[in-house]
Image: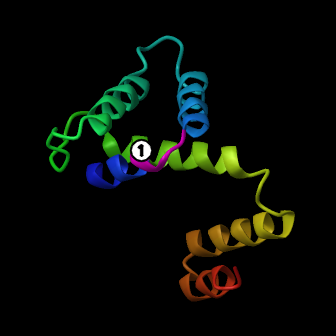
Amino acid sequence: MSFNLLQLLSTLNGAEKRYCHLYLKTFSNKDTPNKILSDFNSLQRIAKKPSSPKKFITEGNSTRLYYKLLDALFMFHQDSILPDEKQLIRRARVLYSKGFNNEALKITEKF
């Protein structure tokens, strides 16, 4: 998962990185130190270095950060998604969570 996270970070442009940073900062608990935000910042530094070993990053919770970034990117790009597509995505998500994988796949194939 950490390698996928680094690949995702390398595809982000400046506006997306800024939005993800603000998203992680805003939706964190104010009482505890923001571990996800510090992981995000350290992974950005690792992704910038071309000579660093990128396959074996085990520090922090990379899976949780990966899904938080996906949520932030969905929020960032939701204005560019047509309203009908949003509805289809929501329907597919609900069907998939209820175990109707084939039906969810049929809806996503409409894109």
Q: In which quadrant is the C terminus drawn?
A: bottom right
Magenta-highlighted residues = 9-13
Secondary structure at numbered mark 1: helix
Sort mark 1 into few (<14), some (14-19) or many (20+) by Cα contacts within 10 Å: many
Image coords of residue 97 (percent x, y): 57, 69
Image coords of residue 66 (percent x, y): 42, 47
Residue situated in front as seen by the camera: 35 or 43 = 43
**Relative to 32, is 2 above or below?**
below
- The residue under the point 76% across, 60% down is 81
**Relative to 61, is 89 above or below?**
below
Q: Say what amino acid the circle numbered 1 marks.
A: Leu
**Scheme of colours in the image:** rainbow
Image coords of residue 40 (percent x, y): 39, 31
Q: How many marks?
A: 1
**Relative to 22, is 51 above or below?**
below
Disc 1 marks which residue? 9
Single out the residue that lies furthest toward the top.
31
- The residue under the point 66% across, 68% down is 94
Asked if residue 54 lies in the magenta stretch, the reply is no
Would residue 6 appear left or right of 84 to someone viewing this image? left
**Magenta highlight: main SS:** helix
